[in-house]
Image: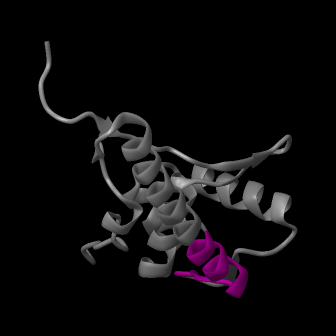
Amino acid sequence: MTTGAPTMRIHLWLETSAGVLMGQGRLQLLEYIQHTGSLSAAAKALGMSYRAAWGKIKASEQILGVKLLEQQAGKGSSAQLSTAAKHLITSYREWLSSVEEYALASATEHFGYAPDKYWSIKDLPPPAISKD
């Protein structure tokens, strides 16, 4: 028999029949882009190809009907988050935080004790990336 409190794990994302709109992976990608100013650097930091990262951004843009990135063309091009992307980050973080709070309270009500949290959206800080 195992001892200790159970751990609550939550993985939430929003999707349509066209694909994923927003989830924790998209959140990290957008925040890394915001931090680095580069889709390429963000993709590299997250261990994905530029093409995969670009595909995720384009899929979300298509579903939402808004641009998430404002790119500046040219050698060493940079990427800035659009106002819509910044709003999406804030909204997703707030939504996930409120779901987490509800789930903990509900678990306490139903099981008589609060489970430990595996992690919290509040524990997921903006990325710290070295400028190598």
- Answer with left or right where residue 49 lies relative to residue 17: left
Q: Depth check: 82 or 23 in front?
A: 23
- Residue 15 in the image: state x and y as whole percent: 74, 47
Residue 1 falls in image quadrant: top left
Q: Residue furthest top?
A: 1
- Residue 9 in the image: state x and y as whole percent: 39, 41
Q: Residue shown at 37%/74% (left/top)?
A: 126
Q: Depth check: 104 or 86 in front?
A: 104
- Answer with left or right where residue 69 lies relative to residue 126: right
- Residue 122 in the image: state x and y as whole percent: 36, 68
Instruction: Reply above or below: 31 against 84.
Output: above
Q: Residue shown at 37%/45% (left/top)?
A: 108
Instruction: Reply above or below: 40 against 3.
Output: below
Segment tinted magenta in the rendering? 76-91
Say whether residue 13 is magenta: no
* Residue 39 in view here: no
Task: Check the image and tell me how it is coloured.
Answer: one colour
- Answer with left or right where residue 73 lies relative to residue 130: right
| Total numbered circles | 0
Instruction: Reply above or below: 54 against 127.
Output: above
Say whether residue 82 is magenta: yes
Image quadrant containing the C terminus? bottom left
Q: Residue shown at 62%/52% (left/top)?
A: 51
- Residue 100 in the image: state x and y as whole percent: 46, 56
